[in-house]
Image (cartoon, rainbow, N blue to C red):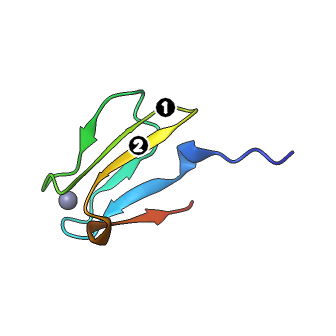
């Protein structure tokens, strides 16, 4: 099985070091400093904000 589980991945804000899971149940979720946001479910993820301010963390 080659199923990629986005659920276990995070978007890390480099400014406030908040970790937002990619699966937010379609709720637009900001980090504490509001530099980035994630809006996603198990099928897709949308990440907003400046690319320099976040990085992906695979679990
Ligand atoms: Zn932040």
Name the residue furthest left. 33
Say above or below: 3 vs 50: above
Quarter of image, ligand 1: bottom left
Give the tally of numbered discs: 2
For the N terminus, the quadrant is top right
Return the residue at label 1: 41
Labels 2 & 1 near each other (Cβ < 8 A): no
* Residue shown at 27% from the left, 39% from the top: 29
Point out residue 20 in the picture as x, y percentages from the top left corner. Answer: 35, 49
Name the foreground residue: 41 vs 21: 41
Dot 1, how many residues are within 10 Å of its Cα: few (below 14), some (14-19), or many (20+)?
some
Dot 2, how many residues are within 10 Å of its Cα: few (below 14), some (14-19), or many (20+)?
some
**How far apart in space, not on screen, are marks 2 and 1 (Cα)?**
9 Å
Quick check: 22 left or right of 14? right
Looking at the image, is mark 2 or mark 1 earlier in the sequence?
1
**SS at mark 2 in the image:** strand
Point out residue 59 in the picture as x, y percentages from the top left corner. Answer: 57, 60
**The label number, if any, that marks residue 46 in the structure image:** 2
Quick check: 14 left or right of 3? left
* Badge 1 residue CB within 8 Å of ligand 1: no
**SS at mark 1 in the image:** loop
Say above or below: 3 vs 59: above
Say above or below: 52 vs 27: below
Q: Nearer the viewer, mark 2 or mark 1?
A: 2
Point out residue 19 in the picture as x, y percentages from the top left corner. Answer: 34, 56
* Residue shown at 27% from the left, 58% from the top: 18
* Residue shown at 26% from the left, 68% from the top: 53
Point out residue 23 in the picture as x, y percentages from the top left corner. Answer: 47, 38
């Amino acid at each position: 099985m080659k199923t990629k589980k986005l659920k276990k991945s995070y978007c890390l804000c480099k400014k406030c070091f908040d970790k937002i899971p990619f699966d937010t149940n379609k709720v637009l979720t900001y980090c504490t400093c509001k530099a980035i946001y994630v809006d996603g479910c198990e099928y897709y993820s949308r990440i907003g904000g400046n690319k320099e301010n976040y990085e992906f963390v695979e679990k």
